[in-house]
Image: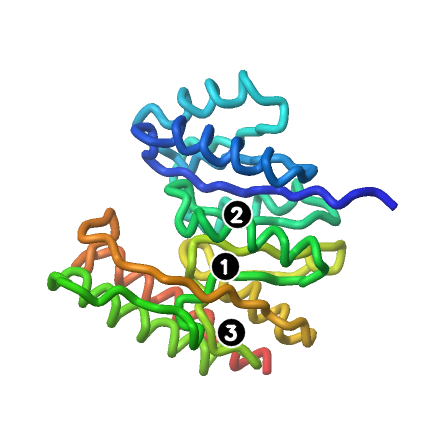
């Protein structure tokens, strides 16, 4: 029986300042895990030197591939395109800033044991949120994130009330999965995929974590793009209800 390959899909946007060092860190960790792997870095229309840094990474590692888009299409759109290059593999969605890095080995172990979908779950009962010395931005991010997760859990999900938006998750795919239609273009592909797995009665395995919210981020609370975020969420909820 052919050994399953782990395909890491790492989306990048204007990540030139840190993507090279982060890639070396990720590759070093993966090699320690002794798995059959490829890393596909997806440059989503970056305007800095992200692409040139990615080419440096590829030149030194035969397991690295690059998909580069001239225009910013949105995280969900580029992941859907990248998934077409994955065939009967185990796919890992991983943000390029490598969140929850210390939990990566556990996620891989659970997938190797046959768990069909494994995700970091900030909403798990055993997860702990560091609430010490929070500023207004962190409090706002925490409240908005939880509100969005609640909306997704009760209006889109079936049999899963956990975290859908964490930056690290892995799952098995096959021919039937690749035929599924996912409508998200920007933000909610993860939620749609989890919804698909729960609809076919696949258990979502959660990894509880200890976590905190960064005091600053590229994600802004008061930004015009948040209206796009809300519009897309409404569209997916509408699609879900019409499909039911």
Q: Position of residue 144 (x, y in %)?
A: 26, 69
Instruction: Name the residue beneath numbered marker 1.
Output: 189
Q: Residues within 10 Å of mark 2 (few under 14, many from 20)?
A: many
Give the distance between the C-alpha atoms of the residues marked 1 and 3, in whole angstroms.
13 Å
240 or 108, nearer to the observer: 108
Q: Residues within 10 Å of mark 1 (few under 14, many from 20)?
A: many
Give the distance between the C-alpha atoms of the residues marked 2 and 3, in whole angstroms.
20 Å
Instruction: Name the residue beneath numbered marker 2.
Output: 79
Q: Residues within 10 Å of mark 3 (few under 14, many from 20)?
A: few
Q: Nearer the viewer, mark 1 or mark 3?
A: 1
Residue occupying the far right of the picture: 1
Asked if residue 25 is positioned above or below residue 130 in the image, the reply reads: above
Quarter of the picture containing the C terminus is: bottom right
* Residue depicted at x 66% and y 37%: 34
Number of callouts: 3
Is disc 2 in contact with disc 1, using a CB cutoff of under 8 Å?
yes
* Residue depicted at x 41% and y 41%: 96
């Amino acid at each position: 029986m052919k050994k399953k390959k782990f395909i890491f899909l790492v989306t990048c946007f204007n990540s030139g300042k840190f993507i090279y060092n982060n890639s070396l860190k990720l590759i070093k960790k993966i090699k320690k895990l002794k798995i059959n792997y490829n890393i596909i870095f997806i440059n989503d229309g970056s305007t800095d030197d992200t692409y040139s840094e990615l080419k440096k990474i590829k030149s030194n590692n035969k397991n690295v591939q690059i998909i580069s888009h001239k225009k910013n299409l949105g995280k969900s759109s580029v992941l859907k395109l990248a998934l077409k290059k994955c065939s009967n593999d185990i796919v890992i969605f991983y943000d390029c800033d490598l969140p929850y890095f210390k939990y990566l080995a556990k996620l891989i172990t659970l997938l190797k044991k046959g768990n069909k979908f494994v995700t970091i779950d900030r909403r798990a009962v055993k997860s702990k949120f560091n609430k010490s010395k929070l500023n207004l931005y962190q409090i706002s991010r925490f409240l908005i994130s939880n509100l969005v997760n609640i909306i997704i859990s009760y209006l889109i999900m079936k049999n899963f009330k956990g975290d859908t938006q964490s930056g690290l998750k892995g799952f098995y795919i096959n021919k039937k999965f690749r035929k599924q239609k996912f409508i998200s273009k920007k933000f909610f592909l993860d939620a749609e995929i989890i919804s698909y797995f729960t609809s076919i009665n696949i258990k979502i395995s959660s990894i509880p974590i200890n976590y905190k919210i960064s005091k600053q981020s590229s994600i802004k609370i008061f930004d015009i793009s948040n209206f796009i975020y809300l519009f897309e969420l409404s569209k997916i909820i509408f699609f879900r209800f019409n499909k039911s």
